[in-house]
Image: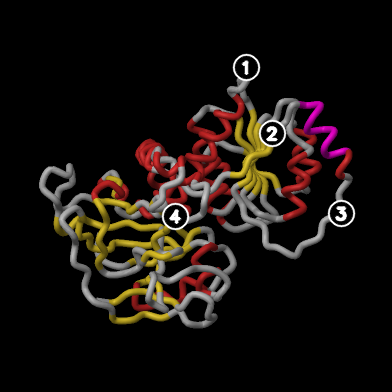
Amino acid sequence: MQALTVKPGTAESLCLAEVPDPVPSSDELLVDGVSLGVCGTDREIASGHYGWPPPGRDRLVLGHESLGRVAQTVPGSGFEVGDLVAGVVRRPDPVPCGACARGEFDMCRNGRYAERGIKDLDGYGSEQWCVETGYATKVNSELTRVGMLMEPTTVVAKAWEQVYRVGERSWFDPRRVLVTGAGPIGLLAALLGVQRRLDVHVLDRVTDGPKPGLVESLGATYHHEPIEDVATRLCPDVIIEATGASQVVISAMSTTAHYGILCLTGVSPPGRTVHIDAGALNRDIVLENDAVVGSVNANLRHYRQAADALAAADIDWLEGLITRRVPLSRAIDAFEPRDGDVKVVIDIGSA
């Protein structure tokens, strides 16, 4: 079968290759690939900046934003042939640490976890793949065109969970949220904010293309001015930061309301220097009881939350996030950014 493979650490090594057909173990589903989302992590791996192949190999099957259809099931697993499923990305470390031992493998303490398509495990970028029954999530059958959004939705489901867990250390009644960045993570964070009946605002630097319309069709408000101006005017209770832009991150730290929460989901590139008044920043955070929390990855609970969120969303709006689709035969094209891209998807097989 064909698979999208890369040699981690080597730029321009991304290619379609013939690999052996998967053979499921006694507790694994055999899944026909339907589609695969492409994100910044995938592009970093393809550029040679990130990623680890499975032990004893030099190439990795890429892809972690999966959607497939069950071709062969496991009796008593609760899955049927024909079910749409998404595969969980992370696996707990084998030691395990305390968090992994309790199912919170997204919070692994020793870094020995593995991740499909990223670290030590092949991903879902192939015509067929296998997944353990305990790491497969059913996707609503109506989401055949958009179900690959499951994994990025888990990321923001966890982020919102973290926000509420931090906020509920005291009385917490958030009303207004500012999301910085209108990429897939930012837009999905806005969706979950709207589903929580919050007053949602989204900030991005572009003034045209699909992003403003996607925000407005959610019933949220789009902004493109500097964050200092927007956040000072709005005084948001919560900021979900999804750009990873160093200056935006720093500005967000000092522009929430009192007892505000900033959740960082964007990953900043190293080597950027930003000049700040560290004393003033510290003073604001302490005197206002503010909190800054980082959030990455997801556990099984967040997959269930994401499945519920997508099932409740408007399918036409979700499909609007997907601005470009390419067949597996032209998968390499998905890694070349184009103006107006929001989410790029590789179609692997028929839905």
Q: Residue 195: percent from the left, percent from the top?
A: 48, 32
Name, please, the residue furthest toward the top.
171
Quadrant for the N terminus, please: bottom left
Q: Earlier in the sequence, mark 4 or mark 1?
A: 4
Q: Is residue 313 visible?
A: no
Cα distance between the residues tagged 2 and 1:
14 Å
Quadrant for the C terminus, please: bottom left
Q: Earlier in the sequence, mark 2 or mark 1?
A: 1
* Image: 329 above or below 72: below
Q: Which mark is residue 275?
A: 3
Q: Which mark is residue 113?
A: 4
Horizontal relation, residue 170 to residue 247: left or right: left
**Viewer-side residue, 101 vs 31:** 101
**Secondary structure at numbered mark 1:** loop
Q: Which mark is residue 291?
A: 2
Cα distance between the residues tagged 2 and 4:
27 Å
Cα distance between the residues tagged 1 and 3:
34 Å
Q: Which residue is mark 1?
A: 171
Counting other residues with Cα less than 10 Å from the Cα at mark 2, is it few (<14), some (14-19), or many (20 or more)? some
Q: Residue 86: percent from the left, percent from the top?
A: 32, 52
